[in-house]
Amino acid sequence: QVQLVESGGGLVQAGDSLRLSCAASGRTFTSFTMGWFRQAPGKEREFVAAISGSTGYAYYADSVKGRFTISRDNAKNTVYLQMNSLKPEDTAAYYCAAGYVRIRYYSPEMYNYWGQGTQVTVSS
């Protein structure tokens, strides 16, 4: 069993930055692809970014490319999401996910474990 705990959300103004963290329990962290998803009220959960455990290669949704950066520290079992130039449309609950993902890294159903979420609110 793997537990994921997100932190770092909050209320910011448009143009500000935030860094989300997700700490994972367990000893197989490097085996997992780690992902960030978000869900706004009344909308489906959508892919934000993912990072491979084996290669460190990162994938991004078009809506955040160039503004968000995903990274991982395997020694700390932690994945980060650095969010810059935040926009009101980035407002959502952000979820960390882990899974043995080799394809369709953008699909929530490919991930086995989920955190409880952290709220990000961007005011205009």
Image (spheres, rainbow, N blue to C red):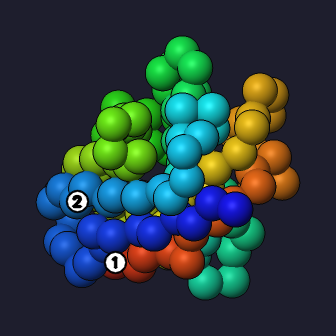
Q: Is residue 32 left or right of residue 5?
A: right
Image quadrant in which you'd find residue 102? top right
Q: CA distance from mark 2 to mark 1?
A: 10 Å
Q: Is residue 61 left or right of residue 11?
A: right
Which residue is at the far front? 27
Q: Quadrant of the N terminus?
A: bottom right
On residue 121, the disc is: 1
Q: Is residue 48 left or right of residue 16?
A: right
Above or below 103: residue 16? below
Disc 1 marks a residue whose amino acid type is Thr
Residue occupying the point 73% across, 69% down = 44
The amino acid sitting under disc 2 is: Leu
Q: Secondary structure at mark 1?
A: strand
Does 93 appear above or below 63? below
Label 2, residues with CA under 10 Å away: few <14, some 14-19, many ≥20: some
Please give left or right for residue 123 compared with residue 45 in the image: left
Location of residue 124 in the rendering, given as x and y in whole percent from the top left corner: 24, 74
Mark 2, secondary structure of its residue: strand
Where does residue 28 sit, x and y in percent of width and height? 59, 40
Checking the image for residue 18, the label placed there is 2
Q: Give the number of callouts.
A: 2
